[in-house]
Amino acid sequence: MSMAQWLETYGQGTVLAAGGGLIGLSFGFLAQRSRFCLRAAVIEFWHRRFGDKLSVWLLAFASAVIGVQLMVLMGWLDTGSARQISAKGSISGAMIGGLLFGVGMVMTRGCASRLLVLSANGNLRALLSGLIFAVTAQAALAGVLSPLRTHISSWWTVDGGAPRDLLALTGMDHWAGLFMGGIWLAAALLFALRSPQRNKWMWLGGIGTGLSVAAAWGFSQWVSSESFDPVRIQGLTFSGPSAEWLMRVLHWPAPAVGFDFGLMPGVFIGSLIGALIGKDWKLEGFSDGYSMRRYIGGAVFMGFGSMLAGGCAVGAGVTGGAIFALTAWLSLVGMWVGAGLTDRWLDGGASAKPTSLPAEGFKRP
Amino acid sequence: MNLASLLETWGDSNVLAMAGALVGFIFGLAAQRTRFCARAAVIECCEGQAGDRFSVWWLAFGACLVGVQALVLAGWLKPSDSRYIASLGSISGAVLGGLFFGAGMILTRGCASRLLILSANGNLRALLSGLVFAVTVQASIAGWLAPARQAMTAWWPVNGGPSRDLLQLSGIGPSGGMVLALLALATGFYFFFKTHQRRWGLALGAVIAGLSIALGWGLTQAIALQSFEAVQIQSLSFSSGSAEMLMRALSTSTSPSAGFDAGLLPATFLGSLLGALVGGDFKLEGFKTENKLGHYLIGAVLMGFGAVLAGGCTVGAGMTGGSLFSLTAWLTLIAIWLGAGMAWRINRRMGWPI
């Protein structure tokens, strides 16, 4: 059966949701197995310990860039119609949002996608932080925090189209984009081969996670080109979908079913399967009051920051980075800087010790 | 300046919100100072040593009954207009909801109003449980849990009007209600001074906490009489108010217009905060041991669903509705005690840490 027939039979929303569910399933499983985590990668980077976490993240990022740029070169994907490039954006929002997200990510010990993956492994801290993240994101999108968000975004805006496309800005074509992806991949391979704790999941998981992001772009473009109704092409992101899911549970009538509807449960189930296979499933809670304050504050920063920046660590960082959107790269840089500074101020570098697993309760430094 | 001109100047919703804020502030302050807590009262009863906390609760309950029945006798409050008596109710919902709520209240270490009061004292456990509670309440009102709630309420409905009014059902009328209320207050005082010798301040606090509910009824009834629009008479209730607050924070465009509940919750928080600062109780607290988070989450979900099913929390159904002698409110109150008692017994038997 072709895509046109599927759309005819099941309707566009269902097809999108099914695709989102499948891609989410693979992302969740691979991210769980490879411990894909921007926070851990950033901390390794700032402590100059270029180990497995950084390698996994770089592998994922490089394969997402290469996958997306290859699809563009083959003519399967038109990144110019993506929201991150075509719509009017905000430079101030991307920078401040990225910084806030980075700060929050270190405080909560995991970015938005990592919280979802960890919740499925029985981590109740991550589940609660995820709830606070979703509440804050929704409040920043359409609630009490949205005036503040629009105000900060209006400080320095950028028009959609070429001014938001890094490749167009620098006068390069998509071959150059592919080449840059190759450089990232070379760096990833260098670190990965020197990493002492490497295993097969690092390779499979890192590359597979990145390809899931590229697959999301390709799939939504495929649906969009076959469908008669307008379909927004998109990659993986977790801030918007978690806010949408919150409102779906809370309020009737629910928003229309689409890609994001399938994505969240897909990632959750994928991560759960990964945890069951790897025997990582364990119920965990908070250990003391200090860590709670930290988690609550971090989730609020992340929720607001992701809406300001237009995506979370995956949504802006990897998904937007792979199509070379200017604001996404600014957010990504903001996240690295914010996370690095917070790690230095808050933890004094304590979190870089290999012994301190995220499973442990956090003690006041 | 009288009420009519106040309504003229400020508008109904603002005056209602101010009334809610006044009542909430008084309740929050009094309840914080007296450590008013239905959960602790139930546990004391279960342990067979009703004393300290139970006497405070019972005295507040008695004061609330006397205050509200006095308003009714004076003609300043028409119980038949309130949603606890006028609208279609559900016996099955009241009983099941009360049982769920009671069990949840044991697990979260505090009922809905107590969670709000504790959050203002820096208790982060209570704050998080309160968030989960509000999310569940909203999901039960208009979200994914709503079909389950509607199915359970449909099992045994009861019509509004006299068949929901205990005083009319039993035929004792308003004066009989006053006699019962006075009896409750008298036993409340007796118990109180038997356990707390000469602690007049504490007794005053409990009485004020109870009377704030009567104040809420009186104020909204007065506004309803003066206003040209339809104003719902109501008093303290924390379940629907918290859901309304959540939706107001989440979505500006679809948020309900401000009313009594909009002022009530923030003011209760402030009142409790002031009480904590005056008494030196403010302390940031989180989870002590790891395994409790699951209990809190399950408890908050049970409590949220139960509150919507029963039409109120311990304060909203138990005291606010109970003081009008609404049939469903009394059933809920009894079910909350039973549910909490059973949950406490089971927990003790199993040796789970709470």
Image (tube, rainbow, N blue to C red):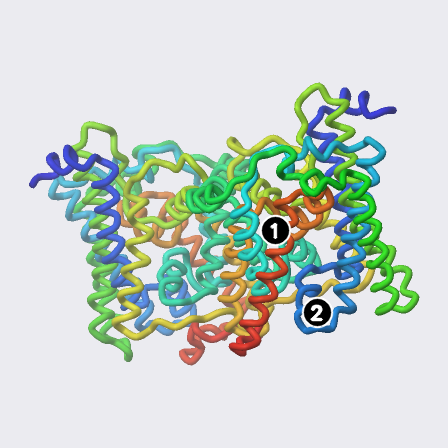
The answer to whether B12 appears left or right of B88 in the picture is: right
Instruction: Say what amino acid the circle numbered 2 marks.
Output: Glu
Image position, residue A17 (x, y; %): 26, 44
The answer to whether B16 appears left or right of A216 in the picture is: right
Image position, residue B329 (x, y; %): 64, 46
Q: Nearer the viewer, residue A157 or B59?
A: B59
Which mark identifies residue A188?
Answer: none
Which residue is painted at 63% across and 39% down in the image? B164
Residue A94 appears in the figure: no
| Numbered marks: total | 2
Extreme residue toward the left, this view: A1
Rounded to the nearest angstrom, the CA distance separating label 1 from label 2 is 20 Å
Tag 1 residue: B332
Q: Nearer the viewer, residue A280 or A314?
A: A280
Which residue is painted at 70% across and 47% down in the image? B322
Instruction: Say what amino acid the circle numbered 1 marks.
Output: Thr
Which mark identifies residue B44?
Answer: 2
The answer to whether A4 appears left or right of B312 in the picture is: left
Which residue is painted at 44% across and 35% down in the image? A157
Image position, residue B66 (x, y; %): 82, 46
Which residue is painted at 45% across and 77% down in the image? A356
